[in-house]
Amino acid sequence: NLQVPRYPADTQHDQIDGDYFAQLGAFAQFNNAKAEKRRLENKFSALFAKLPLYIAEITDYGKSHYRIQTINLSRKNINTLCDVLWPHKIACLAKPINAQ
């Protein structure tokens, strides 16, 4: 099981900073990304209260899409996070921070 850190979100970054982020969804419409982010935060409220999610706008070839992602994490922490989410049929991908 994924252990929820006891640190507040503002100090947690120093505890788990890494070269990756977890992508938890990508959507063509911002409102769809916003709704899924809210659903994830409600379903896993204790986890995402300490591990904030945000929506990044990505533009490729003039088209935008919206990615739900975590802060930067170590690959090990992302693997643990994904192990928790996959049984709930939630896509979770580790991506390097320099990836679009």
Image: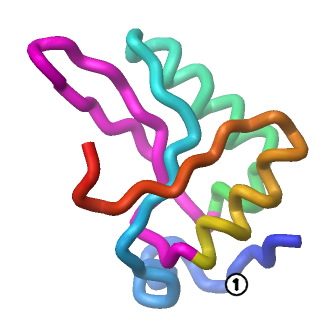
Please state the horizontal and vertical placement of residue 61, each as a whole percent of the image: 11, 17
Q: Which corner quadrant holds the C terminus? A: top left
Residue 71 in magenta? yes
Count residues near mark 1 (Cα–Cα under 10 Å), then give few for <14, some for 14-19, many for 20+.
few
SS assignment for the magenta stretch, majority = strand
- Residue closest to the far left: 62
The amino acid beneath tag 1 is Arg
Q: Could you say which quadrant of the image residue 18 lies in? A: bottom left
- Residue at the image position 41 percent from the left and 88 percent from the top: 14
The residue labelled by disc 1 is 6
Q: How far across and how far down the image is residue 25, in percent?
A: 54, 32
Say if the magenta span includes residue 39.
no
User: Where is residue 19 shown, x and y percent of the image?
Assistant: 36, 74
Q: Residue at x 82, y 57 (%)?
A: 84
Q: Quadrant of the N terminus?
A: bottom right
Q: Which residues are magenta?
A: 50-75
Q: Element under label 1?
A: loop
